[in-house]
Amino acid sequence: RNSGPDTGKVLSFRRRHLGKSLSLSYETPLKIVRGSGAFLVDETGRPFLDTVNNVAHVGHEHPRVVKAGQAQMAVLNTNTRYLHDSINRFAEALLGTFPDELSVVHFVNSGSEANELALRMARAATGHRDMIAVEVGYHGNTGACIDISSYKFDGKGGKGAPAHTHIVPLPDAFRGLYRGRDTGEKYAAHIREQIQQVHAAGRGVAGFICESIISCGGQIELPDGYLKTAYEAVRKAGGVCIADEVQVGCGRVGHAFWAFELHGVVPDIVTIGKPIGNGHPLAAVVCTRKVAEAFANGMEYFNTFGGNPVSCAIGREVLQVIADEGLQENALATGEYLKEELRNLRTSFPIIGDVRGQGLFLGFELVDDHRRPLGGQAEYLANRMRDLGILMSTDGRDHNVLKIKPPAVFSRTNADELLFRLETVLGEDAMAV
Ligand code: PMP
């Protein structure tokens, strides 16, 4: 395995002085020094095709985004207590991508901060604290976000769900409690059951939070009708519905700009992160006027960096690049092609149990012929692909799902390169079941 000349030194400093809970990708970690389009370049100058990074949405270090940030940084960066055109222009462009009901935005600096604020809003709007969230979901690193993230509190170092969090089964049509795409109603029934339990305990429901394709859970597409039925039940109980679009938003899913739109619902609160800043720390909470009014109870919401002119210039440029370069259309065309070809690979390699996702938010799952998860093979595959110059990552409860969520500039040629290398590795002895 090749690692660069400097990797050892960087690694040993990191081990001594950086927090131990940080993780590194791959058995032989990479030292990346540059990015461009769908590629990352290591310290030896070797390019790697990036199939993982949905943050660098319009491509790593997109020149227009870099320039927009540099230009504004050279003039002014300050907070939202002054009037500035940059924040208004970005807010207008961002809200223009939403249904009319979602008309108020708060800018923050990370997906975690966005969900943290969304939780505060849900509490303010309902007077309640109890949240319903999905098994193996992840919503961020703050205290309140960990409290609704089964991916964390049910995993290593976790202490299980706190009393005010109510977890419903992962609506996994392939390997979950109920199987098939027509299981939306059955899965949603668990939400009604949780609502009843909250009520039975003499409390009320603040809200329900869900991604429209569940990422850390293993690129899980929601079964038909799930979100619609879930939202109806939660609203009937007086709760608000939060769509976490941190991973799936900004045109990535192809058929829609926001993934909740695939399900014919309109959330009360939407949280946005990763892709909107293309790597710059920028995130947002978009909500209905009703929720915004309830949140504005007299206590000032101040965020030192949220909505600063530099971040807003960057966010606006990202939205313009997505439109100018047709990246939503590319995500759809390239994603459909890739999904189809991955399904074809499944015929030769039955270890691929399921291929799923929308646009350039795809996943394939490695299982044996009893649908038992093959996490070891998934890890082997990701590490071998890295050796061959392609960056992939695994996720899901059993870490047996390969996630494909590249920069949205990912081309058909890039897809062909990925497929070519996958075919090689899938045929290796270590992949045998
Ligand atoms: N929500 C989802 C669905 C996420 O995947 C993440 C990050 N992986 C977050 C929220 C938190 O975002 P951040 O890391 O920017 O705080």
Image (tube, grey):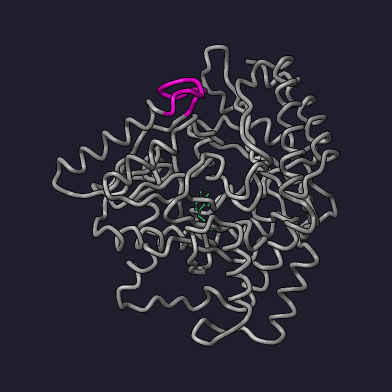
- Residue 213 picture location, percent across and down: 54, 40
Q: Nearer the viewer, residue 386 or 408?
A: 408
Q: Is residue 372 left or right of residue 339?
A: left
Q: What is the magenta segment's predominant secondary structure? A: loop
Q: Is residue 193 left or right of residue 140?
A: left
Indicate the quadrant where residue 194 lies.
top left
Residue 27 visible, this orientation:
no
Task: Kindly identify the residue that appears in the image at 73 percent across and 23 percent down.
Answer: 426
Q: Is residue 39 above or below residue 155?
A: below
Q: How many marks?
A: 0
Task: Kindly identify the residue that appears in the image at 69 percent across and 36 percent down.
Answer: 383
User: Which contiguous range is marked in magenta?
Assistant: 172-184
Of the 4 image quadrants, the one containing the C terminus is top right
Of the 4 image quadrants, the one containing the N terminus is top right
Task: Kindly identify the residue that appears in the image at 57 percent across and 20 percent down.
Answer: 367
Q: Residue furthest top?
A: 369
